[in-house]
Amino acid sequence: MAETRILSHPFPPVYDEHSEILILGSFPSVKSVEDGYYYANPLNRFYPMMSELFHEDFVKVPWADKRKLLLKHHVALHDAIGKIAIEGSSDAKIHHAEPADLKLIFEKAKIHHIYCNGAKAYEQFLRYFPEVKIPVTVLPSTSPANARMR
């Protein structure tokens, strides 16, 4: 049985004043926390998906370059949850979640659409940010735990 840990979000949001879309996950995985950046698990489909969308190699470059590519394409990146109690990395094992601070992103960037990476991110966004009146789309999770998607 995995140990329950209480964690605060370890990464600052990725955004600048030119960001137009915000991609929200739920909370970084154990692998992401260990490696120090969003979607670090090599089995996660996030960066292969970004490579397909933007015709740039997000996969084989270090985090600093991934970040630059995201900003180049006006993509902001963060998570809906700012603090949690969790067992392992599974969204199903999240307890006592608290919202992330998204205020600066909405104040400084020109976000006109939010994409939630998975149902848990969408659920948490709706729960914690009902006042945000920006269109939101829920997408299938890019997590390797989402075995239904290839």
Image: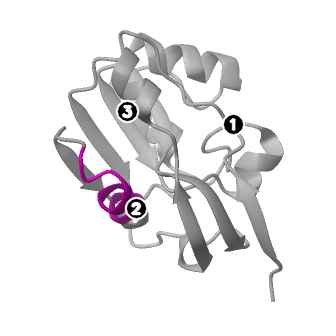
Q: Is residue 88 left or right of residue 126?
A: right
Q: Please tell me whether mark 3 or mark 2 is closer to you in this view.
A: 2
Which tag, 1 or 3, sits closer to the chain's start?
Answer: 1
Q: Secondary structure at mark 1?
A: loop
Which tag, 2 or 1, sits closer to the chain's start?
Answer: 1
The residue labelled by disc 2 is 124
Residue 126 falls in image quadrant:
bottom left
Colour scheme: one colour
Q: Secondary structure at mark 3?
A: helix
Crowd around label 3: few <14 · some 14–19 · many ≥20 (10 Å): few
Q: Which mark is residue 52?
A: 3
Residue 74, visible in the rendered structure: no
Q: Is residue 123 left or right of residue 85?
A: left
Q: Is residue 40 left or right of residue 48?
A: right
Q: The residue under label 1 is which amino acid type?
A: Tyr
Q: The residue under label 3 is which amino acid type?
A: Glu
- Distance in Å between CA atoms under marks 2 and 1: 21 Å
Q: Which residues are magenta?
A: 121-131
Q: The residue under label 2 is which amino acid type?
A: Gln
Q: Please tell me whether mark 2 or mark 1 is closer to you in this view.
A: 2
Q: Which mark is residue 37?
A: 1
Residue 116, visible in the rendered structure: yes
Residue located 30% across and 44% down the image: 115
Q: Position of residue 52 (x, y in %)?
A: 37, 32
67 lies above or below 123 = above
